[in-house]
Image (cartoon, rainbow, N blue to C red):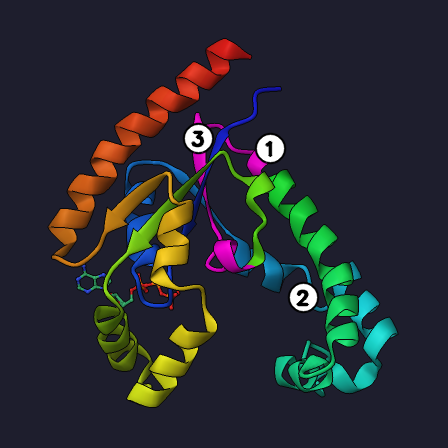
Amino acid sequence: MSWPYVVGVTGGIGSGKSTVCAEFERLGVVVIDADEVAREVVLPGSQGLAAIVAEFGAGILNPMGSLDRSALRRVVFADPARRESLEKILHPLIRTRIREQVSRVLSPYCLLAIPLLVEKGNYDQVNRILVVDCPVATQISRVMARDNLTLQEAEAIIRSQATREQRLNKADEIIVNVADIESVKSQVERLHADYLAHAANLQTSL
Ligand code: ATP
């Protein structure tokens, strides 16, 4: 079985990860979204949700039987041991599901979008790291406009994430998203050619 080359995409809130991923998708590249996978593994009826209920009780369910994320957040907030229990349940499920999705990719490479890649340090799932970067002031104005946040709320989220420098230090490639979408498109097209070449090299060296 051939295994695709996996490019991890990361970046701070509002840096433009989704915008960049959409451009790769336009070129036919499969994008796996780690946040989406994290939501899928706790859907009603899933093994993940059953395990969470067994650990934390039915109080973390909504009346309709789905996960009440804010109730769960309250339970694990400020209690590292409980947070660790939650992560022990979720991480193996998320990893397995990501591997399943990667194994089904037919193109030579795929993107794995992990917003908190640098914060969590789970680099073993990716062959390369692509960082989407822009100045903090740009992140702030984008998320204030998109999510209707106050300046203080936007700044608090950014403070809770890795710094721009920490992320750039881990980057194999960087997309600078400060100009218009045309500039994103041309950077994506250039990288797409590079990744196809990397993927081809990997296949021949196996
Ligand atoms: P999050 O971390 O919140 O998921 P993200 O990194 O995926 O965000 P996007 O959703 O791609 O970021 O972009 C944030 C906002 O900024 C969106 O409203 C998007 O349309 C806008 N945006 C992104 N890049 C550009 C650009 N080059 N020019 C204009 N607007 C942009």
Which residue position holds label 2?
A: 43
Which residue position holds label 1?
A: 103
The reply to whether callout 3 and callout 1 are in contact (CB within 8 Å) is no
Q: Ligand 1 is located in which of the four quadrants?
A: bottom left
Q: What residue type is labelled 2?
A: Leu
Q: Which amino acid does label 1 sit on?
A: Ser
The CA span between labels 3 and 2 is 28 Å
What residue is at 71 percent from the left and 80 percent from the top?
76
- x then y, percent, for residue 114: 49, 54
What residue is at 60 percent from the left and 64 percent from the top?
39
Which secondary structure, mark 1? helix
Give the label on residue 57, or none: none
Q: In this view, does 5 lie above or below 74?
A: above
The reply to whether callout 3 and callout 2 are in contact (CB within 8 Å) is no
Which residue position holds label 3?
A: 109
Q: Which circle, 3 or 2, is nearer the viewer?
A: 3
Q: Is residue 102 above or below residue 65?
A: above
What residue is at 28 percent from the left and 81 percent from the top?
144
What is the quadrant of the N terminus in the image? Answer: top right
